[in-house]
Image: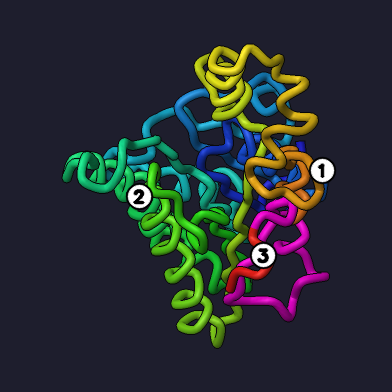
Amino acid sequence: MTAPGRVPTAVVTGGGSGIGAATALALAAAGHCVVVGDLAVIDPVATHPDITAVLGDLSAPGAAADLVSTAAGRHGRVDVLVNNLGISPHREGFEKTTDEDWARTFEINLFVPIRATRAALPWLTRSGGVIVNVTSALAREPMVTMPDYCASKAALAAMTRMIADEFGPDGVRCLAVAPGPTLTGQWTGPGGQLERQEAATGTSREELLRGPIPRQLGLSLGRLAEPGEVAEVITFLTSGAAAAMTGTTVTVDGGMLRGVG
C-alpha cells in the first residue's frame, strides 16, 4: 500500500459498482489512495490494495462527512472528491411523481454531494484539490419519464459552476462529467433496461445493442459507453493535464446531445 500522507487521496461516493467503481480503479492506477463509499462494493474494488471501502448509506445523517473524515484520517489529506452516487428511477410522468419521490431523489443526487463537498473543502483548499460531479446528459435534454432525476442532475451541474467560482481563488477546481447511456447495472443488471427490452421485443440484448437501442437514443457512435470510458475522463479532469479547466461540464454521451446547448 502507498505511504499515508505522501500520496494524493481521492474520495469516490457510489464507488462500489458501475462508473464509480471504474473511477476508483482508474484513480488508483493513476497513483491515488482511494476511499469509496457505497452500500456494497464489487470484488475488484474491495480487494484492491490502494482502495478502502466504507460500507453504508451515504444519505444517512453525517455519513458523507464521515466518509471524508475516514479518508483524511487514514491518509492525512484529501485531494480529489468524485460525487458519483446517484439514483435514476423511472416514473410515469410529472403528475405521478410524488413529493416523496422528489425528496428521495434530491436527497441522494444533490444533498449527498452538497454534504460531501462541504466536508471536503477544508482539505481541498489546503491541497489545491479537485471536485468532479457526475451529472447526466439528461440534465440538458430531460426525459419526461425521469423528471426528478433530470432536475436533480441539472441542479448538480449548477452547483458545479458555483463551487468553481467561489473556491477557484483558493486553488480548488470543480468540474462535472455528464455521461449519456452507459453500460452500468441500470442497463445490464437483473430487471435492467436490456432485460425489459428483450422481454418486450423478443430480441436478444446483443442484437439490441448492435442497432435498435443506439438508433433509438440517437447515438452517433452507434453504441453505449463503457463505465471505464467515463472513468478515464473523470481521471483526466483530476490530473495536472486539466489544470486550467474548472466550472465546465464534459459530456460523454456517444453523440446523443449533438446540437444541444
Q: Residue at x 56, y 82 (%)?
A: 168
Q: Residue at x 60, y 69 (%)?
A: 260
Secondary structure, mark 1, is: helix
> From this viewpoint, which residue is outermost toward the front?
201
Q: Name above or below for residue 63 compared with residue 5.
A: above
Residue named by callout 2: 147
Q: Residue at x 58, y 76 (%)?
A: 247
Secondary structure, mark 2, is: helix
Q: Nearer the viewer, residue 237 or 140?
A: 140
x and y percentages locating residue 71 in the rendered image: 54, 46
Q: Name above or below for residue 170 compared with residue 52.
A: below
Residue named by callout 3: 250
Give the Cα distance between marks 1 and 2.
Answer: 36 Å
Residue named by callout 1: 29
Q: Nearer the viewer, residue 129 or 222?
A: 222
Going from the N terminus, do you reach mark 1 or mark 3 first? 1
Residue span colored magenta: 234-256
Left or right, residue 101 beside residue 123: left
x and y percentages locating residue 142 in the rendered image: 45, 55
Tell me if residue 72 is in the magenta stretch: no
Determine if residue 100 is in view.
Answer: yes
Mark 1, Cα crowd under 10 Å, few <14 / some 14-19 / many 20+, is few
